[in-house]
Image (cartoon, rainbow, N blue to C red):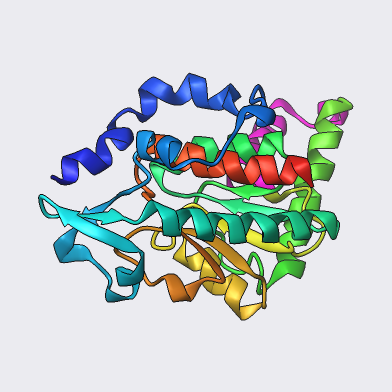
Amino acid sequence: MEDNKVQAAEAVAEEKNEQESYFASLDVSKIEQSLEEMMKAGVHFGHQKARRNPKMDEYIFTTRKGINILDLQKTQEKIQEALEFIKSVKKSGKSILFVGTKIQAKDLVRDVATAASMPFVCERWLGGTFTNFKVIRGRTRYLVDSEGMLARGEFKKYTKFEQMKKMEELEKMEKRMGGIKNMADLPGAIFAASIKEDNLAITEARKMGIPVIAIADTNVDPSYVDFPIPANDDAISSLRLILSYAYKAIQEA
C-alpha cells in the first residue's frame, strides 16, 4: 500500500519541467483552500499504520487498508494558523527560509522560494548554517563576490587552469549554498517540507530560537515544530498544494 504514497517520487523526472515554472506563473487569486482540493491532491494519505507516531493521533481520521488517513478539517485549521504566521513574518520584513532536501521536494522548494524572493536549501543541509552563521555568511559573500568578478571578466587575468579551478569551485559552492547566498541575516522562520528529512535544519532553528513551520506526515512528532501542517509529505501534488498556500500568503502580505 505504500506504493500509493510514493508514486510522486517515481514521477519526479516527468514533472520536473512543469515544476520549474509552476509558481512563477501561478495566479494566486485562483488558489482557494478547500477540502476538495486537498483530497484531490492526496494531502490526506499518511504512512502505513505500523509507522504511525502516537503524537499524530489527534490529526488522524481513520485507517484504510493499513494506511493512516489524515483529518483534512484539522489540516485546514493548522494550515490557516501557519499562513497567518507566514504573513506576520513577511510583514515584519524578515525572510522565510524554505527547506526541502528530499527528492520530491527539491525542485518545488527551489521554485517557490525563487518566485517569492526567499532563500532556500534543497541540497544537503550545511551544519552550522544557523549556529555558525557568521562563518557561513563569509562563504556566501565570497561566492557572490566571485560571481561578480566572473561577470565582469576579471577571471581572464588567471591562467586557463586557474580559471577552470575557479569555475569548479563556484559551481560546487552554488550548488551547496546558492539558495542562501543573499541571506544577510538569520531568517524570521523556516518552512520545512518534511519534519523527518529536514530534521537537521529544524534542530538548528530550534537552537537559535527560529520558529519552524513544517509539513507533518503521520510518522513524525508534530510537537517538534511550532506550526505543524498535518499532510502527505511524499506526493508531489500534496507538497505543491501546501507550498502554493504558503506562496499566496507571502504574496498577500
- Image coordinates for residue 185, horizontal then vertical, percent: 80, 62
Camera sees residue 172: no
- Residue at 41 percent of width and 34 percent of height: 237
Location of residue 241 with respect to 29 vertically, above or below: below
Q: Which residues are magenta?
A: 154-179
- Image coordinates for residue 87, horizontal then vertical, percent: 74, 54
Front in this rendered view, residue 212 or 140 = 212
- Residue at 21 percent of width and 39 percent of height: 4
- Residue at 63 percent of width and 60 percent of height: 190
Q: Is residue 92 left or right of residue 53?
A: right
Location of residue 166 with respect to 29 vertically, above or below: below
Locate the N terminus by quadrant.
Answer: top left
Whether 79 is among the magenta residues is no
- Image coordinates for residue 150, horizontal then vertical, percent: 81, 30
- Image coordinates for residue 183, horizontal then vertical, percent: 77, 53
Q: Is residue 221 left or right of residue 208?
A: left
Principal secondary structure, stretch drawn in magenta:
helix
Quadrant of the image occupied by residue 250: top right
